[in-house]
Image (cartoon, rainbow, N blue to C red):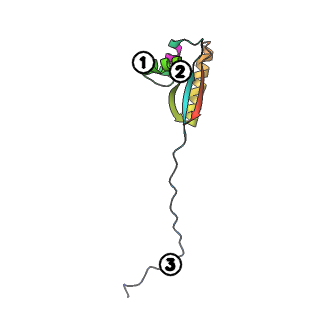
């Protein structure tokens, strides 16, 4: 038996696997209006976006002063759900609070 024989070629092609891409992220923005109370915006940030009381107050003030502010950054499906939750909660509480998403 000859131990110097090369491995036979069986015609098997080896392909490199493509690396998975991270999904695109979206900024969820709260839009300021003249009717929604600051307390309600803070409540939304704490309960829908799970922000601490301090962080919610900071974001709420930013929204109030700048006209809009980032509530969070999520994948498309999660961002869409958060926006729907904000709009539903605002509607149930008679607030016109609006929320949008922008691609990061």
Q: Is residue 62 above or below residue 20?
A: above
Q: Position of residue 15 (x, y in %)?
A: 52, 64
Mark found first going from the N terminus, 1 or 3: 3
**Residue pointed to by mark 2:** 66
Mark found first going from the N terminus, 3 or 2: 3
Quarter containing the C terminus: top right
**Residue pointed to by mark 3:** 9
Q: Nearer the viewer, residue 99 or 83?
A: 99
Q: Regarding mark 1 in the picture, which secondary structure is present there?
A: helix
**Disc 1 residue crowd, few under 14, some 14–19, many 20+, Cα 10 Å:** few
Q: Nearer the viewer, residue 57 or 76?
A: 57
**Residue pointed to by mark 1:** 53
Mark found first going from the N terminus, 2 or 1: 1
Cα–Cα span, label 3 and label 2: 67 Å
Q: Marks 3 and 2: CB-CB under 8 Å? A: no
Q: Which residues are magenta?
A: 40-44
Q: Position of residue 53 (x, y in %)?
A: 42, 18
Q: Nearer the viewer, residue 67 or 59?
A: 67
Q: Position of residue 75 (x, y in %)?
A: 54, 37
Q: Position of residue 1 (x, y in %)?
A: 38, 88
Cα–Cα span, label 1 and label 3: 66 Å
**Disc 2 residue crowd, few under 14, some 14–19, many 20+, Cα 10 Å:** few
Q: Is residue 72 magenta?
A: no
Q: Is residue 93 above or below residue 8?
A: above
For the stretch drawn in magenta, what is the main secondary structure? helix
């Amino acid at each position: 038996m000859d131990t110097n024989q090369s491995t036979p070629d069986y015609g098997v092609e080896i392909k490199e696997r493509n690396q998975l891409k991270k999904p695109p992220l979206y900024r969820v923005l709260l839009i300021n209006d003249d009717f929604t109370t600051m307390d309600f915006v803070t409540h939304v940030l704490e309960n829908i976006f799970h922000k601490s009381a301090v962080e919610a107050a900071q974001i709420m003030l930013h929204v109030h002063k700048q006209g809009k502010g980032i509530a969070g950054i999520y994948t498309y499906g999660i961002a869409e759900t958060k926006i729907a939750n904000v709009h539903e909660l605002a509607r149930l509480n008679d607030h016109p609070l609006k929320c949008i998403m922008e691609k990061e």
